[in-house]
Image (cartoon, grey):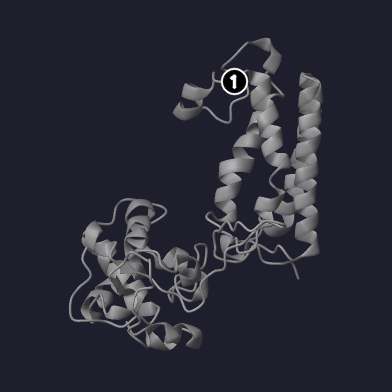
Amino acid sequence: MTFAAAVSIGVVALGVSGQAPRPGSGQARTAKDGVYTAAQAARGSAIFQTRCAVCHGDRLEGLAGPPLVGDVFLGPRDKQPVSDLFDKIHNTMPADAPGTLEPPQVADLVAFILQANMFPAGGAELGAADAMLKQIALVAANPAPATAAAGTATAFPVTGTLNQVMRGILFPSSNVLFDVQTKDPGAGSKGGVARADASTTSSRYGDVYAPWMVVDAAAISIAEIGPVLMQPGRRCENGKPVPVDRADWQEYVQGVVDAGRAAYRASQTRNQEAVSDATNVISDACANCHRVYRDVPSAAQRCTPPR
């Protein structure tokens, strides 16, 4: 499959010169140095079409999954070793059958992705050895800038997608609070109450703090989520940018923060009914945003501003 015509002009500039690795990058080569072969990329293209295109699009433009070409893909990965991309595919993809791709297949897929991003082919195939892949750096024409909190000089780059943040923070924290509707945290000393879920991890560590302390922490994590949801550069799982500049998004984020603060005030009363009532506010705050930005006909349309 020939892909050159499908990639934007801005990406073409990535493969023009044999730029040396950046000082301090730790890699001996970059993806501009011809680290795969055209035949290998062709094999990767065939694998991509059968295993990956349903989520990432026939032209890697992104559908339910994020784009795999251009600044959206390369910007956050500038200076990262190719081994990171290899491991991501090998361990977590395809999303519906992670871990089913053999290492040579993953290497072929990486070669295809490099070709799609206009990195030149070379005379030797890309291998699957971790030590070798760590020596090859990805490079971006427009690296994603780090973001800094107001009034500080420390920058913290975005790591997770919006969906991952929801799963890692808001979903478990909200479930701790919703659990209070049916289980009184004051009924026992420790353990078995107000857990995020019934997983082995939460069961194992569920007795570290008193139940009301767990409820307090869950409410605080929701109240403190504002800067995370408003962090520039964060993207949705489908690759679209989180609409942090839109007034309605800012309003929804404020609503979630206010709901978290209300839940914390309720938790401080150590009253099950008060916290139960506060969960209605949290549910409404989440639903307001979901109706606009999540509950759309397809995952590819999430984070798309309403018309």
Provide residue 160's location: percent of width, then percent of height: 53, 54
Q: Give the labeled residue for mark 1.
A: 209
The quarter of the displayed image where residue 212 is located: top right
Q: Is residue 153 left or right of residue 139?
A: right
Q: Is residue 176 left or right of residue 208?
A: right
Q: Is residue 220 left or right of residue 44?
A: right
Provide residue 214's location: percent of width, then percent of height: 64, 25
Residue drawn at the location 73% of the way across and 58% of the way down:
292
Provide residue 278's location: percent of width, then percent of height: 79, 32
The quarter of the displayed image where residue 216 is located: top right
Q: Quadrant of the C terminus?
A: bottom right
Tell me if residue 29 can be seen. yes
Residue drawn at the location 62% of the way across and 11% of the way down:
189
Provide residue 243's location: percent of width, then percent of height: 69, 64
Residue drawn at the location 55% of the way across and 56% of the way down:
161
In the displayed structure, 232 sits above or below 173; it is below
Q: Quadrant of the N terminus?
A: bottom left
